[in-house]
Amino acid sequence: MAKLVLGLGTSHGPQLFLQPEQWELRATADRQNPQHWYRGKPYNYETLLAARKDQDFSPHLTPEAKRAHFERCQRAIGAIADVYKTAKPDVAVVIGNDQSEIFTDENIPAFSVFWGNSIDNYPRSPEELAKLTPGIAPAEIGYKPPTRTSYACDQALGKHIIGSLIDSGFDVGQSKKLPTGPRNSNAAPHAFGYVFRRVMEDKPIPIVPVLVNTHYPPNRPKATRCFEFGRAIGRAIMSFPGDTRVALIGSGGLTHYVIEEDFDRGVLAAMEADDDKAIAAIDDSLFASGGTAEIKNWIPVCGAMREAGLKMKVIDYVPCYRSPAGTGNAMAFAYWRA
């Protein structure tokens, strides 16, 4: 049977690809954002600033601090890529999310597995780039190849996972062709593009894309469901005939657009301690921000690793602040390895 040899959890936020002096572009977007979620409640930028007035983020906002945080993240990404290469998987099951990239209001599945032969990724047009919020366009290099590129998928494993999930009680969505999203594009969502570009360093192996609806209510699965979904994926992989070496990669998170270090560290500690109850008990209101909810791409990996008996190792946790209100993206990088 197939062997689950590696689990990875990795952030993929734009600040990983913007030079620190460009982080102010994202802070500009934060000031324009009318709704920031903090501790389960919505704020605009000014009310968020007032709510966090007793927290001094200024030490994190100096050019030197931003540069240090950026460099820590680059070292962690390099470490993730090294762990991936050392494990030598034959195929990777990648868990990510969609942000109106391929799904539309016509249909947004809670969980979906792709089992086509390949997916494409390609750059946005200049017109599309011009419409993006500040700081997103220059970060596209981390998600998009220079030209249209086709990436192989493992159709047999994808089909097997779907059947096994159905047998486990998950009425999962499925597709053999990426739909064309609101932007008239069927390019791979950025969660997957990041894995191709930075984890696999543009030398991709076949993948099975798995999508979790982290962003769009009312059918966003809760943490406990994501954990059980991951356990079912782990069982599915390990029941696949043959001697395939499989990696499972969760792409996204941690807290953003408002950084909440205590919450992040609590989630990571629960994963490290194999504390299933603590993971299942996370209040879903704390995932109201779609960005923060990308932690739900990590939780299935954690569940699968429980099935495989692999322990988590955190490489680094880096809260990358970009404004006095504590906005930014907390980056984390971790692995489970046989």
Image: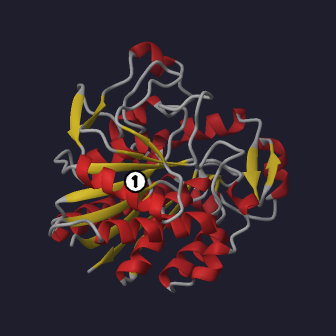
Identified at 16% across, 60% down, the residue is 90
Q: Position of residue 22 (x, y in %)?
A: 48, 39
Q: 307 or 253, which lies in front?
A: 307
Residue 310 vertical placement versus 51 (above, below): below
Q: 230 or 266, which lies in front?
A: 230
Apparent side of residue 273 relative to residue 138 in the rendered image (left or right): right
Label 1 crowd bin: few (<14), some (14–19), many (20+), radius 10 Å: many
Q: Which residue is mark 1?
A: 162
Which quadrant of the figure has residue 282?
Answer: bottom right
Question: What secondary structure is marked by label 1?
Answer: helix
Q: How many callouts does the rendering have?
A: 1
Identified at 77% across, 61% down, the residue is 39
Q: Position of residue 127 (x, y in %)?
A: 45, 13
Q: Position of residue 236 (x, y in %)?
A: 36, 66
Which quadrant of the figure has residue 82?
Answer: bottom left
Q: Is residue 330 visible?
A: no
Which of the image's four quarters has the C terminus?
bottom left
Apparent side of residue 1 relative to residue 295 in the rendered image (left or right): left
Identified at 48% across, 54% down, the residue is 252
Identified at 43% across, 43% down, the residue is 174
Apparent side of residue 274 relative to residue 149 in the rendered image (left or right): right
Q: Position of residue 238 (x, y in %)?
A: 30, 72
Residue extending farthest to the top is 127
Apparent side of residue 155 relative to residue 130 in the rendered image (left or right): left
